[in-house]
Image (cartoon, rainbow, N blue to C red):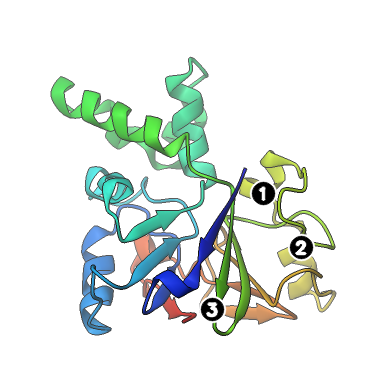
Amino acid sequence: MYHKIDGSEYRRIFIVGDIHGCYKKLMDALDRVQFERETDLVVSVGDLADRGSQNLECYELLNASWFRAVRGNHEQMAIDVLAGGAFDTWIANGGRWFFSLQESKKHQAEQLIKLAEKLPLVIEINTDNGKYVIAHADYPSDEYVYGKPVSEQLVVWNRKRLNAAMKGESNEIAGADKFIFGHTPLVKPSLFKNQLYIDTGAVFGNTLTLIQIQ
């Protein structure tokens, strides 16, 4: 469930919001910051594919040495379908592309989705600016502890904390300097206490958010 990254191994570290098949938007964003694949790192908050048009390209990022990701609910839906689960929910949420693939491409997609099954749900990054915790939707506890058992479903699906924060009811999560989440499309990156939400709806024609934490 957990993975730890030592920031001292990289020159710069960036966190990217939900990509959802917008591969070109990611490449354009990396070009703008003159991203160096040999020395820099990108960490995704999950939801690499679905709804957009470059889904295979986005899943292929899992093979890149300069790219890391936590598992999002869209990866989870794909994983569940390949494990024999019902496909209605995935199709309703943008997964139709998978079923339209030619057989060779579908096999490639299946292999990549199996890689996604190995993704952690929580990534801790220790940087020269402090400790960051990355998860898709939420860290469902009031105190972060590396390795602490928490609900996997809430990590990838929960919106209760964000909904409460948007009503003015927010609290810090202890145990790290900042938490970064995606999952819920917002007009702009939004900070509530020490929780930053960076899904800005790139697949709906908006900006793909890329922030530098080191």
Marker disc for residue 80: none
Q: Residue 174: give x, y in percent of width and height.
A: 81, 70
> From the viewer's perspective, is 37 left or right of 159?
left
Spatial distance from mark 3 to mark 2, Cα to Cα?
A: 16 Å
Q: Quadrant of residue 102?
A: top left
Would residue 185 appear left or right of 61 to someone viewing this image? right
Q: Which residue is mark 3?
A: 189
Q: Say which residue label 1 marks.
A: 155
* Type of amino acid at the residue the image marks with label 3: Pro
Q: Residues within 10 Å of mark 2 (few under 14, many from 20)?
A: some
Q: Earlier in the sequence, mark 3 or mark 2?
A: 2
Q: Write down the residue under mark 2.
A: 161
In depth, the one of 24 and 69 nearer the eye is 69
Which residue is depicted at the point 25% across and 45% down? 60
Type of amino acid at the residue the image marks with label 1: Val
Category of crowding for the residue at label 1, using alpha-carbon neighbours closer than 10 angstroms: few (below 14), some (14–19), many (at least 20): many
- Mark 2: which amino acid? Arg
Secondary structure, mark 1, is helix
Could you tell whether 158 is left or right of 102 in the image?
Answer: right
Give x and y (percent) for residue 104: 14, 23
Q: Residues within 10 Å of mark 3 (few under 14, many from 20)?
A: some
